[in-house]
Image: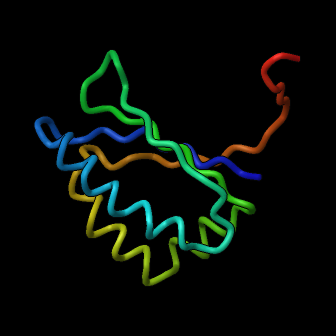
Amino acid sequence: MITEHALLTVRPGMENDFEVAFSEAKSIIASMEGFCGLTLSRCIESAGTYLLLVEWARLEDHTEGFRGSAAYQDWRKLLHHFYLPFPTVQHYEPVITMPAGT
């Protein structure tokens, strides 16, 4: 399992529109092969900053499958105009995990 990490800075005053657009866009990414789930979180201390975590079965499911797809163009049209600056996306693999209560 790979976790995609993107810190999204949304243009001031566009946060509500971004959240509405993301609600629509989530079905696009969810339809992709290797998609395992996502979380979009809004920063409490910094208005307009969001953390997007997407879980993929394999790195290539994101970098080749999703980004190389026609569906990615729809995702891009819905979301990319909200970002300033454009986010850096990084990928992580688990090293240590610990479920709650252990």
Measured along the vertical axis of the image, is residue 24 above or below residue 67? above
Left or right placement of residue 96 versus residue 57 in this view: right
Q: Residue furthest bottom?
A: 70
Question: What residue is drawn where x is 44% and y is 66%?
Answer: 27
Query: What's the coloring here?
Result: rainbow
Give residue 8's quadrant in the image: top left
Left or right placement of residue 53 versus residue 84 in this view: right
Left or right placement of residue 95 versus residue 65 in this view: right
Q: Residue furthest front?
A: 101
Measured along the vertical axis of the image, is residue 53 above or below residue 27? above
Residue sitting nearer the eye, 32 or 81: 32
Total marks in image: 0
Give residue 70's quadrant in the image: bottom left
Measured along the vertical axis of the image, is residue 26 above or below residue 49? below
Q: Residue furthest right?
A: 102
Question: How far across and how far down the image is residue 3, in percent?
Answer: 66, 47
Question: What residue is drawn where x is 11% and y is 37%?
Answer: 13
Question: What residue is drawn where x is 26% and y is 57%?
Answer: 21
Question: How far across and how far down the image is residue 19, in percent?
Answer: 28, 47
Residue sitting nearer the eye, 84 or 65: 65
Question: How far across and how far down the image is residue 44, in percent?
Answer: 35, 19
Quadrant where the C terminus lies?
top right
Question: What residue is drawn where x is 49% and y is 66%?
Answer: 29
